[in-house]
Image: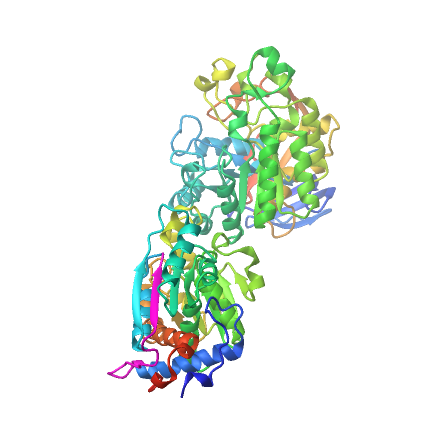
Amino acid sequence: MNRDAQPILIRNARVMDPASGLDEQMDLAISGGKIVELGKTLAQTDEMQSVDAAGLVLCPGLIDLKVKTGEPGSEHRETLHSAGLAAAAGGVTTMVISPDTDPVIDDAALVEFIARSSRSKSLVNVLPAGALTKGLAGQKMAEIGLMSEAGAVLFSNGDQSIASADVMRKVLAYAGAFNALVSCRAEDATLAGSGVMHSGELSSRLGLKGIPIAAETINIARDIALAELTGGQLLIDQISSADGIALVRGAKAKGLEVFCSVSVHHLTLNELDVGEYRTFARLCPPLRAETDRRALVAGLADGTVDAIVSAHDPRPAEEKRLPFAESTPGACGLETLLCGALSLVHNEEISLIELLRGLTSGPADLLGLPSGRIETGAPADLILFDLDTPWVCDAGQLLSKSKNTPFDGRRMQGKTSATLVGGEVVYDSHGLFAG
Amino acid sequence: MTATNYSFAKPHFLGIAGLNRPEVESLLELADRYIELNRRTVKISDKLRGLTQINLFFEPSTRTQSSFEIAGKRLGMDVINMMVQTSSVSKGETLIDTAVTLNAMHPDVLVVRHSASGAAELLSQKVDCAVINAGDGQHEHPTQALLDALAIRRALGRMDGLRIAICGDIAHSRVARSNVALMNLLGAEVRLCGPPTLLPSDADRWGAEVFHNMDEAVTGCDVVMMLRLQNERMDSAAIPSAREYFRFYGLDRARLAKAGKQALVMHPGPMNRGVEIDSELADDPQVSLITGQVEMGVAARMAVLDMLVSDRADSDRAGDAP
């Protein structure tokens, strides 16, 4: 955060704040890295840089709870620096870094390393997630308390669920004492086995081994029961199915502290996007049926889904240019998080403000962050975006070191124009702030 | 004074649960007198001379077994120690077989420790003599609670109205269960503190307030009792590491400073120095009651033995009891 930066006045923007429901044309003033004033027509002082944002949406910067980089350990895939570039271009101002690096972030010193080194390396805010279990092996609880103190904002077991219900029970109970959020993928590894896509007619026609929805719902049901038993806070990471959403909806109706996220890809794509064995569409969990996708969107609209994540997982060509079943699952998502999600608005599946809630205040509330909202005193983590401009996604143009996006070749509508982190302009595609 | 002044109608001493306040007060008063006897050079009373005490320990123990042995010998009893291995045979069978065998030798009191909760109770149903529970699984360790109460009363003059925090592995602790019951009986306010993996969520129904934050738990306490963290807990994924445990649930001076000004530290032993308690604190006679607890142990156990079996002894020989 640059407190000495010139104060900025953004005028005539369509200000949207999902936290308060605000959606009006307004001016917003930034000073000392914070939002200092919001009003219909704000007075401009000489020292202020004035920016006319007519026609653009101004909303809180996106908060992405699930980002993988390759740092440390696999820097050829992605570094904190390159992920920061991609995030800024995508309108993401805060990214939570998944602990599944090499070494695994399962120790307070490593959490501190990510938190400290990120400040100098990344354009956007980086928050470390700690590993739930040592080495992500799912057996021995990691030092959740010490990592919390060192700055871990949530605890995750990466892309592996914890096979042992007893270990899951213990981490949920233990984390409760530190008010720590436990984030876990829901997948029964024995049932998912060596499956590579959604189990159904298409997978059998393609001759690819399927992963049944039960592989997800069995673990969701188990983990909800354990959250109820222990009183722990559970974030189910990347739900993919209608049945999974129904389970979370039921848990919330019971008053449990159960939350869930969905990836932008699962909200906008389905199993048909695998098409002729497109490995960019090989994800974990797999893209499901269209009815599942619709249920995920409905869950987002009714508040069952708390956060939309990019599930950013950069994979270089050598991991994707392979026969489908031999390729590595995962997709880049930081740069296409907002524009990919906007297609739901253009298709009239969800309102813009409901969509933005899942990208801003929803995840901010899960982590207890002061950002993710537009109010005076909040950090000036903001984005300006154009809702309508059409463009075609070209994976080759991605700023990520890896180029694996299932949106490659897709027609998009709407794009980030500028990104501010702590009042500092970190991305400005149209030179809005250049003058 | 003879034991007839005290009322103790129960045939066995299996747990604090089921005792009433007058019974406990009587035991504590009697124990107080035995402390005086124990500080004399000649410590022998022949009050229970001719009676036989068998220490039946199915779990290894140093301090409890020797404490019971000394207690019995100072009362003039013949004391036999039996260490029983529990390895191969089904435990229920072994326990009852052993009980029947020992019963045939006509002991007057059996002191039993067993790794299974309820073992002392089961044994008491099978023998004709008095049974004292010296620790059954994760259930009760009533003589430990009694000696802790004795130590607190002697140090602070009372138990009523004291605020006491019991911290550590509550879930697996028979010491905690017996102490909560006894401290409640004597009017203390009891707090329990430990990580949620080592503190059952329903422990608030034992008559104690449950904490997971140690700093909050010790605030304003008169006594902080630390429990031993068993090494096997470390391997069972209940806590991540010894260093994290000490950071959040260990007792050091900084943390003790949050308790009352004259707060005392207790530990049933054996201690894991640097895991649940700072070594220097444990050894500081100004705040640590830990060594005193051991002294109280012998007296408390003499009181229990006296109460339970003195009517078995010939009244002629009850001579110079305190």
Front position in the image: A218 or B249: A218
Q: Quadrant of residue B27?
A: bottom left
Q: Position of residue A181 (x, y in %)?
A: 54, 46
Q: Quadrant of residue A91?
A: top right
Residue in the image at 41% along x and 68% along y: B144
Residue B210 coordinates in the image, percent (x, y): 54, 62
Prevalent SS, magenta region:
loop
Location of the C terminus of chain B by quadrant is: bottom left
Instruction: Check the image and report above or below for A230 versus B51.
Output: above
Comparing B152 with B182, the one in front is B182
Q: Colour scheme in the image?
A: rainbow
- In this image, B7 relative to A340: left or right? left
Q: Quadrant of residue A53?
A: top right
In the displayed structure, A313 sits above or below B266; it is above
Residue at 40% across, 29% down: A75
Q: Position of residue A408 (x, y in %)?
A: 58, 18
Q: Position of residue B169 (x, y in %)?
A: 44, 57
Q: Is residue B233 visible?
A: yes
Which quarter of the figure is the N terminus of chain B placed in?
A: bottom left
Name above or below for residue B92 compared with residue A353.
Answer: below
State whether residue A384 is above or below residue A256: above
Q: How many marks?
A: 0
Residue range highlighted in magenta: B38-58
